[in-house]
Image (spheres, rainbow, N blue to C red):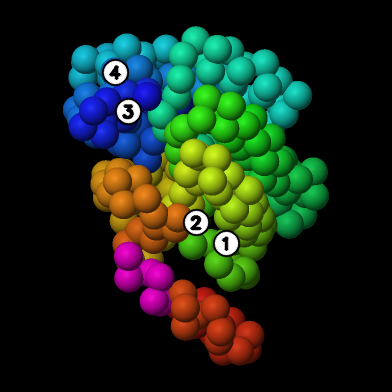
Amino acid sequence: MKDALGSVQSLLILGGTSDIALATARRMATDKTRRIVLAARPSERLDAAAQDLRAFGAEVDTVAFDASEVESHEKALGEVFANGDIDVVLLAFGVLGDQAADEQDPVAAARVAQTNYVGAVASGLVCANALKKQGHGALVVLSSVAGERARRDNFIYGSTKAGLDTFAQGLGDAMHGSGVHVMVVRPGFVETKMTAGMEKVPFSTTPDAVADAIIAGLRRGSEIVWVPAALRYVFSGLRHLPRPLFRKVAKR
């Protein structure tokens, strides 16, 4: 539970090797967060991430978690909550896939949806219900502006984020009045290991900038956070462009 000054005491990250999630965890550890749980598939990267956060004075545990294995979520995540209350859950996992290849391989495309959407629905419900049971907490869902409108070059990934975004908003409504706060975060292009080698686009951002926006949004009690904030106004216009015109704009 948060301390008397409102600092987050415990953090659970689903997708424990995410650059954005780890940037957020470092800031929270600096601001008195003492228990951090990284849930991800076991790997050297996960172990290194845990060791890095321990240097900030936090108690860090790792939990084996595979977003695509939805049948395992309740047991794996239930054990985390059984070991103590969680103040903030950050749902940060996801895969980009390969648009061109996935269009020719429906099974591969389905795997992207299984991880980004189906896995998020299952784990999001498990965590939301656990937060509701303990009577407090926040669920932060990392969405993307890619879900705001389908683009030719990433519509498979974008469609999974659109579904996730809608799910998270509805979950927030379902949790209203329960003591559980659901916050949707919509970053633009983020310069991470997942996007390494890709061409930057206008309004690109960084994991540190997204982390700052997440923490500020939690303090404000925001329901939706855009990163950078200007994208909210950009997409309010793009959302309503006629499709022929949008196709031309999206190619630039």
Tell me the amino acid under the disc marked 4: Arg
Query: How far apart are labels 2 and 3 at the CA level?
Result: 28 Å
Predominant SS of the magenta segment: helix
Q: Nearer the viewer, mark 2 or mark 3?
A: 3
Tell me residue 182's x, y (percent).
Answer: 50, 46
Q: Which residue is mark 1?
A: 147
Q: Compare marks 4 and 2 and give the one earlier in the sequence.
A: 4
Q: Nearer the viewer, mark 1 or mark 3?
A: 3
Query: How far apart are labels 4 and 2 at the CA level?
Result: 29 Å
Give the quarter of the image for residue 22: top left
Q: Compare marks 1 and 3 and give the one earlier in the sequence.
A: 3
Q: Is residue 33 left or right of residue 251?
A: left
Query: How far apart are labels 4 and 3 at the CA level?
Result: 11 Å
Residue 115 in sight here: no
Quadrant housing the N terminus: top left
Q: Which residue is mark 4?
A: 34
At x 40% / y 77%, what residue is drawn? Answer: 234
Tell me the amino acid under the disc marked 3: Lys
Tell me residue 192's x, y (percent).
Answer: 37, 44
The one of 200 and 118 positioned closer to us in this rendering:
118
Magenta highlight range: 229-234
In the rendering, which numbered label is found on residue 144? 2
Tell me the amino acid under the disc marked 1: Gly
Q: Which residue is mark 3?
A: 2
